[in-house]
Amino acid sequence: MARAVGLIVVPFIIYLSFFYVHFAVLTHSGTGDAFMSPAFQETLIGNELLMNSQGLGKSPQAFFMLILLSQSFVTMMSSL
């Protein structure tokens, strides 16, 4: 049992933790933004396009909250 945990569970948790860090950092602007579409760049925190954008109301947090609320609503409705 300990061997299974050491060879399967621990590496899997490490693997998932890399995705967690990746998606936590993904919301911030960086040096590779020029390769992304302007629509995607507007969603990044600290991006010049976001500051000049009128579509998101200059608040990326409001945009992400809307996504989270819609996902939770879909989850709630699918569980009924």
Image: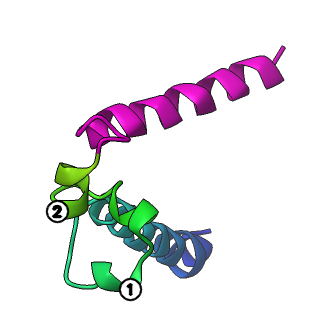
Q: Would residue 37 be found to the left or right of residue 32 on screen? A: right
In the rendered structure, which segment of residues is drawn in magenta?
Answer: 54-80
- Residue 13 location (% of width, % of height): 47, 67
- Residue 55 location (% of width, % of height): 38, 41
Q: Is residue 76 magenta?
A: yes
Q: Is residue 47 visible?
A: no
Q: Which residue is depicted at the point 28% across and 49% down?
A: 53
Residue placed under numbered mark 1 in the picture: 35
- Residue 65 location (% of width, % of height): 40, 31
Number of disc labels: 2
Among the 4 quarters of the image, the one containing residue 17 = bottom left
Task: Report the disc number at residue 72.
Answer: none
Quadrant of the frame with the C terminus: top right
Residue placed under numbered mark 2 in the picture: 48
Badge 1 density bin: few <14, some 14–19, many ≥20, Cα 10 Å: few
Between 7 and 72, which is closer to the camera in this rendering? 72
> Dot 1: what SS?
helix
Q: Would residue 43 be found to the left or right of residue 59 on screen? A: right
User: Is residue 34 shown above or below 22?
Assistant: below
Badge 2 density bin: few <14, some 14–19, many ≥20, Cα 10 Å: few
Quadrant of the frame with the N terminus: bottom right
Between 27 and 56, which is closer to the camera in this rendering? 56
Q: Which residue is depicted at the point 15% across and 58% down?
A: 46
Could you tell me the amino acid type at mark 2? Glu
Between 16 and 21, which is closer to the camera in this rendering? 21
Q: Is residue 19 magenta?
A: no
Quick one: label 1 or label 2, which is nearer the N terminus?
1
User: Is residue 37 shown above or below 43?
Assistant: below
Among the 4 quarters of the image, the one containing residue 22 = bottom left
Could you tell me the amino acid type at mark 1? Phe
